[in-house]
Image (spheres, coloured by chain):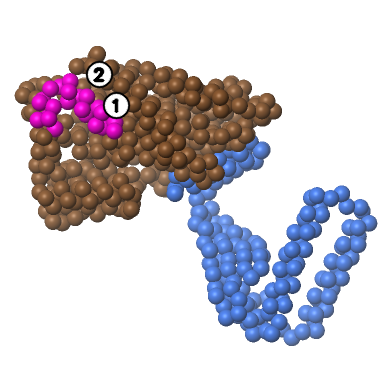
Chain colours: A blue, B brown
Amino acid sequence: MTNYINLEASKHQMKLVMMGADVKQIYSKLCYVRFDLDRCRVSYVYNINKSNRYFLERIKPYPLPYRDFNNEEDIINEINFDIKQFQNAELSQNIYKFIQINKNIHNLMKEFEDLFLYYNVPKEKFAYLLDELSQISDMIKKVQNNSDKIFFESEP
Amino acid sequence: MITAILIFIVTYIFIITEKINRTVITLFAAIVMIVIHIIDEESAIKAIDFNTIGLLVGMMIIVNILKRTGVFQFIAIKAAKYAKGDPWKIILFFSVITALSSAFLDNVTTILLIAPVTFVITDTLKINPIPFLTTEILAANIGGTATLIGDPPNIMIGGKTDLGFLDFITNLGPVIIVIFIITLFILKLLYRKSLKVEKENKLKIMDFDESKTIKDKPLLIKSLIVLGITIIGFTIHEIPFINVETSIVALLGASLLLLISKVDVEEILLEIEWPTIFFFIGLFIIVGGLEQQQIIHKLAHNLFTFTKGNMLFTALVILWLSALASSFLDNIPFVSVMIPLIKNFPEYGGNMGIDITPLWWALALGACLGGNGTLIGASSNVIVSGLLEKNGNKLSFLKYMKIGFPLMIVSVVISMIYLVIFYL
């Protein structure tokens, strides 16, 4: 298996280098983390390497890339806070609605990227899109201001 | 004695069937042999051929550092561009690179270096990679036969005899060149009709920039200098002034390169094929147990009674037996049993002063070339078939055997003629 991984890595590296990339392969451990909560499953993926840069990403119930961290303790703390937030969010009657909205936002980002990469969009449409986004953002803030903050383990 | 034979047979069955990892079962069997006093602890340690182990570890360290430089990709791309994208010329150049590299590096390592480039080239040419990789595994096994360090059977033979690097290259090199040329000629006849590519894809190969593959020029220079010194060391290790084992030469090269290259030693040591090293250690102890129980002695007696101690007949039996066995079985355990067996030959040849060197060449040629016979004959074959399958190009056992087995027979016939003319 190690031979296969090394060979695939060499093949990928060569193809990417020929495409003009600078490729650096580093030894790391990829960690998949899964929490089965009562009403949903929360999972993360992160890597540990010697260069002290850890990339954490939540993959379930909806994908969310976090920043990269400089030490492994920060990752554990981040996951710890995140799980506590989810445990609390589970108490809400609206948890599935929240998750669904988040999934839709994620899909929206993908659709927007397609628009950016594959279409020649007229200038005026950008203003329209920005305005719509701004309205959604205002709406979220308004809902935040009108709702009780119920869990303070970490600041949003 | 019966327990020792049973342990050996059961271990061998597991190695062949791959039901249990070969390193795990071999180490377990070796330790069981010590626990039940088939071999005592001191003899078990003595049975381990540290020259073979040191040579393997030393060369693995050198190669692991060398491959980081990208030099193999550089040479391969240069060759593909020199061939102007012509598939047969690429096969020819790649197989020459493979055979030459394999003569000085481990076969598996050579395949792991050339296969990624081959996949990239065949992806670009939009052509089936099977003819390319089949030729490369044949070339790796043939090239590895030419030197003491090219293939584990030769390393093991070198470790247990006084035969040095120069002995191997001067005695096996000429016949290997002949076998290699004839094999390529036959492969060209076989593949000539299937190697057709679009002109535009050939042009894509010319767009490759080989200079991008060299990642660390100072490391490349240091690595090539140390590899050169190591190869020179192999050629002169036996002269009285130096007189050190090949393992010392390899470990000197490895430690020197670690010292001057500033690479991360942990990463380099992680890439050593420790399962292979422990497999060897386990095997040496098991064979040591068989020797201590006089089983090897009895096997030798039976073999040489069959051949009546006749050198010519014995050499041919060893050559063909090793070739056929190595086609279907792992040649490392086979050779580990054959070495002490051959060492017993003078006793049965009726002449204690008889020169048994031709028997070593017969074993080396048979065991190394036999690996070409089937897809399971050598580790590099197994790796390539796995890679082809994962990349959507299945190379079945029979499909490979239709090409590999006749070519193996041709190579053994050439070896037989060579041995008869020059040694027997």
Gap between marks 2 and 1 measured at Cα: 10 Å
Closest to the observer, B381 or B118? B381
Q: Could you tell me residue B41's position as x and y percent?
A: 15, 50
**Residue occupying image coordinates x 32% and y 53%:** B20
Q: State which region is magenta.
A: B303-324
Callouts 2 and 1 close, C-beta under 8 Å: yes
Residue B36 vertical position relative to residue B190 in the rendered view, above or below: below
Residue B419 circle label: 2
Name the residue furthest top: B421
Query: Residue B47: in sight, yes or no?
Result: yes
**Residue occupying image coordinates x 42% and y 19%:** B181
Residue B365 circle label: 1
Q: What SS does tag 1 mark?
A: helix
Q: Would you say residue B265 sits in the magenta stretch?
A: no
Residue B335 vertical position relative to residue A4 in the rendered view, above or below: above
What chain does badge 1 belong to? B
What chain does badge 2 belong to? B
Look at label 1 and name its amino acid: Leu
Q: Do labels 2 and 1 share a chain?
A: yes
Query: Residue B212: in sight, yes or no?
Result: no
**Residue occupying image coordinates x 58% and y 21%:** B83
Look at label 2 and name its amino acid: Leu
Classed neighbour count for the residue bearing mark 2: other residues with Cα under 10 Å, few (<14), some (14–19), many (≥20): many
Residue B121 vertical position relative to residue B417 in the rendered view, above or below: below
